[in-house]
Image (spheres, helix red, strand yellow):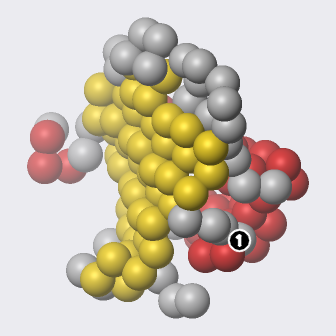
């Protein structure tokens, strides 16, 4: 499945704290928004693109099921949407449930990378 953008959001219902991440391969940028951290951005340069591609190839989000759930309370609600241009091509959602551990762990490394790398750049250009 081809996709040019991924949008990931997560919320912890117990405290209502959430964050989001967008990786846009057409615009070549990463944008994140987190409680307390605000909106941050970075250009998807060669180094960042290599890191993102490696983590995506391990997590394979295009193969995830539509829904994951586990009978636990106050865990993590998350949604991942994949787009090809403006067209939504895949949605996966979890409520305390996740894809297989190796894929989820690889995706969490991607999210952590995106939230960390954007700290170097700060606010999106249009917000400066």
Residue 84 in sight from this viewpoint: yes
Secondary element at tag 1: loop
- Tell me the quarter of the image containing the C terminus: top left
User: Which residue was labeled with disc 1?
Assistant: 60
Quadrant in which residue 37 is drawn = top left
**Left or right, residue 104 beside residue 44:** right
**Left or right, residue 116 beside residue 72:** left
Vertical placement of residue 38 versus 117, above or below:
above
Residue 19's spot in the image, x, y percent?
Answer: 41, 33
Point out the residue furthest to the right here: 102
Label 1 neighbourhood size at 10 Å, few (<14), some (14-19), many (20+)?
some
Point out the residue furthest to the bottom here: 1
Vertical placement of residue 126 versus 127, above or below:
below
Number of residue marks: 1
The residue at 25%/46% (across/down) is 124
The residue at 50%/35% (across/down) is 77
Quadrant in which residue 24 is drawn = bottom left
């Amino acid at each position: 499945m081809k996709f040019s953008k991924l949008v990931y959001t997560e919320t912890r219902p117990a405290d209502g704290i959430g964050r989001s991440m967008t990786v846009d391969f057409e615009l070549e940028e990463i944008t994140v928004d987190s409680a307390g951290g605000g909106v941050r951005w970075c250009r998807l340069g060669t180094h960042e693109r290599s890191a993102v591609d490696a983590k995506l190839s391990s997590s394979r989000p295009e193969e995830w099921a539509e829904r994951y759930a586990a009978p636990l309370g106050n865990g993590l609600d998350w949604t991942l949407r994949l787009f090809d241009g403006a067209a939504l091509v895949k949605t996966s959602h979890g409520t305390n449930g996740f894809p297989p551990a190796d894929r989820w762990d690889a995706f969490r490394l991607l999210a952590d990378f995106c939230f960390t790398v954007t700290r170097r750049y700060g606010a999106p250009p249009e917000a400066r």
